[in-house]
Amino acid sequence: MVTLQKVHGSENSFFLLDETQLKQPLTTSQLAAFTKQVTNRQTGWLGGADGVLAITDAPGTAGKMTVVNTDGSLAKLCGNGLRTVARYLSEKTGQSAFKVHTDFADLAVAKQSPLASGVPAYSVEISPVSFAAADLPFANLGVDRIVDTVLPAIHPSLKFTAVAVPNPHLIAFVSKEELASPDLERIGKMLNAKNPYFPEGVNVTFAEILGKDTLFARTYERGVGFTNACGTGMSATTLAFILTHPQEAAFERVNTVYNPGGMVKTMVHHDHERYWIELIGNATVTATITVPDEALESGKLTQATFQPTGEQAAYEQFIDSLPHRDLADTLIEGA
């Protein structure tokens, strides 16, 4: 039997699969097919999810994380998911600080003080960071770097910043009204269909500046669509915030980023021309799932059994106490 977890960071939800439990890891096609099946919002497990987090062994680290989107494609990184992987590996190994391997870097993670009673929290490193057109990639926009730049081909007046962390992100700071407007979905869909500007697609975030070191962010994710939160998106948005609004934000200072699924803390570090972002937030396990090995490999997943953990109630009590829940609820209902 294999035991999986249903997990979330800021309500960005995943099924976590430790493939070291299997005789051999799933093939790429098996993992994609499994992900499409269990994450489906109508027919998947427990109401579906935003993706699957697969863990395998990686020498010199506590393990490797692979992120699979709902459409079966691979994401370069997932900050909210990485926190849940950090928790899983911390509980598995007994370590409180260690590194997790990804295809782009070995990233530092650490256990933090709970956000509230029953709400475990972890910090994770988001890197590497690049503004280069080739790393996003983008083309046909008349620029080779996008920082606080109007892009008429995408929107007539919004100023955008594009940064890879390493997931590609396109960010605009907007009013509360624009945050809830159809523009984010329109732009997200346009740039994640066949288009001449971001040929591999891009995550699009709109963020409202609420005050000093404080944001509300909403993201349309590549390969998924609207999610309650995007960890790399909130990290990239914090960097864009510092670069474009230095009177409101600064390096080495804690930021609070609210989102439809809750809240995270971020801090951007700048050292010898290198940026990296620290992302701190919840790592919640809502259920455990048990399924026979052969059913997992064959895709016949009706034999799974589910056991709730009770942690979701504590998380909901925490987010109900946060500011800006009226805006969050409006955006969730309208998505």
Image: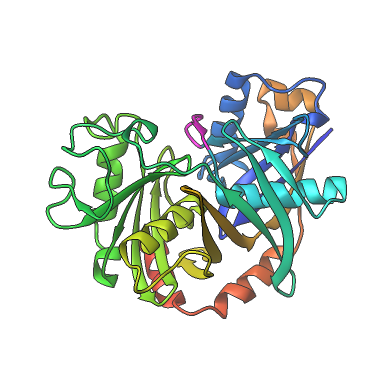
Write the residue at 32% across / 35% down. Answer: 133
Quadrant occupied by the N terminus: top right
From the viewer's side, name the closer residue of 2 and 85: 85
Above or below residue 115? Residue 53 is above
Query: Does the magenta run of residues contain 153?
Result: no
Question: Is 127 placed left or right of 246 in the picture?
Answer: right
Q: Return the x and y of residue 244 as percentages of the image width and height.
A: 31, 62
From the viewer's side, name the closer residue of 210 and 48: 210
Is residue 329 among what the camera can see? no
Q: Return the x and y of residue 65 as percentages of the image width and height.
A: 66, 37
How was the colour assigned to the protein in this rendering? rainbow
- In the rendered image, which quarter is residue 329 located in? bottom left
Region rendered in magenta: 70-76
Quadrant occupied by the C terminus: bottom left
Write the residue at 56% across / 26% down. Answer: 32
Residue furthest front in the image: 272
Residue furthest right in the image: 94
Write the residue at 63% across / 47% down. Answer: 82
Question: Is 248 placed left or right of 186 in the picture?
Answer: right
Question: Is 27 placed left or right of 216 in the picture?
Answer: right
Q: Return the x and y of residue 102 as percentages of the image width and height.
A: 62, 35
From the viewer's side, name the closer residue of 146 and 300: 146
